[in-house]
Image (cartoon, helix red, strand yellow):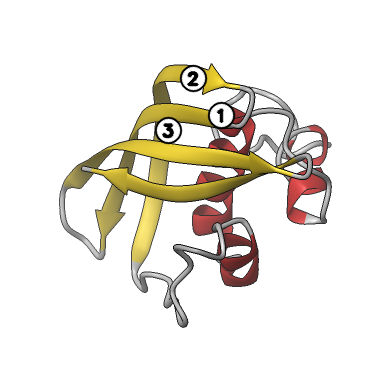
C-alpha cells in the first residue's frame, strides 16, 4: 500500500517528494515548493534548511509545534528565466484545536548548479 504525498499531487510519497527529501534535485521550483510543504507536514527541519538558499537561510529554524497541515493548492508557477521562478500557493493548517487557517505566499526560487533553492516569500 502506498501512502499519498502530503503535497497534494495525488501521487505516492515514494514517487513524489520522498526522493527530493533524500537528496534528488527538484525538476522545477514548483516541485521544490511542494517538497518543502511536505517537509513541514512531516517535520523534516534539516531538509527545509538545506533547500533554503544560503544567502537567505536562517541560522536556526524551529518547526511549528502543534500545527497540522491540511492541504496545499498551487495557484501559479512562473519561471521568469532559466535560473529564477515564482510560485504562489495557499497552504491550509490548524493549530491545536483551533479553526483552519490559510497561509498564502508568493515565493521566489533560484536555480544554481542544477538545484532549485527557496529564496524568500511575500504573504
- Place of residue 88 in the rendered image (x, y in percent of width and height, measured from the top left): 36, 28
Left or right? Give the position of 46 relative to 120.
Answer: right
* Image coordinates for residue 102, horizontal then vertical, percent: 22, 40
Labels 1 and 2 touching (C-beta < 8 A): no
- Out of 85 and 70, give the one closest to the viewer: 85
Residue at image coords 58%, 55%: 39
Query: Whole-Å distance between the Cαs marked 1 and 2?
Result: 13 Å
Give the answer, above or below, for where 35 lies relative to 61. Answer: above
From what the image shows, is residue 28 above or below residue 112? Answer: above
Decide which of tag 3 and tag 2 comes sooner along the chain: 3
Inter-mark Cα distance, 3 to 2 = 23 Å
Q: Position of residue 46 (x, y in %)?
A: 63, 71
Q: Classify 10 Å Cα crowding around label 2: few (below 14), some (14-19), many (20 and above).
A: few
What residue lies at 34% left-to-right and 62% top-to-bottom?
A: 67
Q: Earlier in the sequence, mark 1 or mark 3?
A: 1
Location of residue 112 by image quarter: top right
**Which of label 3 and label 2 is nearer to you?**
2
- Residue at (42, 33) in percent of width and height: 72
Q: Position of residue 23 (x, y in %)?
A: 82, 54
Task: State the CA–CA distance, disc 1 to disc 3.
Answer: 12 Å
* Residue appearing at x 46%, y 82% in the figure: 60
**CB within 8 Å, label 1 to label 3:** no
State left or right for residue 43 relative to residue 62.
right
Above or below: residue 68 compared with residue 87? below
Q: Quadrant of residue 7?
A: top right
Q: Residue furthest bottom?
A: 60
The residue where tag 1 is placed is 30
Q: Secondary structure at mark 1?
A: helix
Q: Which residue is mark 3?
A: 72
- Count residues near mark 1 (Cα–Cα under 10 Å), then give few for <14, some for 14-19, many for 20+: many
Residue identifier under label 2 = 80
Amino acid at each position: 500500500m502506498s501512502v499519498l504525498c502530503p503535497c497534494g499531487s495525488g501521487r505516492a510519497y515514494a514517487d513524489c517528494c520522498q526522493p527530493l527529501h533524500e537528496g534528488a534535485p527538484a525538476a522545477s521550483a514548483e516541485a521544490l515548493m511542494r517538497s518543502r510543504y511536505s517537509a513541514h507536514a512531516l517535520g523534516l527541519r534539516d531538509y527545509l534548511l538545506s533547500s533554503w538558499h544560503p544567502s537567505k537561510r536562517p541560522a536556526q529554524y524551529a518547526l511549528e509545534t502543534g500545527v497540522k497541515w491540511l492541504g496545499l493548492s498551487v495557484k501559479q508557477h512562473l519561471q521568469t528565466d532559466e535560473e529564477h521562478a515564482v510560485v504562489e500557493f495557499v497552504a491550509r493548517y490548524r493549530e491545536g484545536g483551533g479553526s483552519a487557517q490559510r497561509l498564502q505566499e508568493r515565493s521566489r526560487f533560484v536555480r544554481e548548479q542544477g538545484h532549485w533553492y527557496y529564496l524568500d516569500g511575500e504573504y
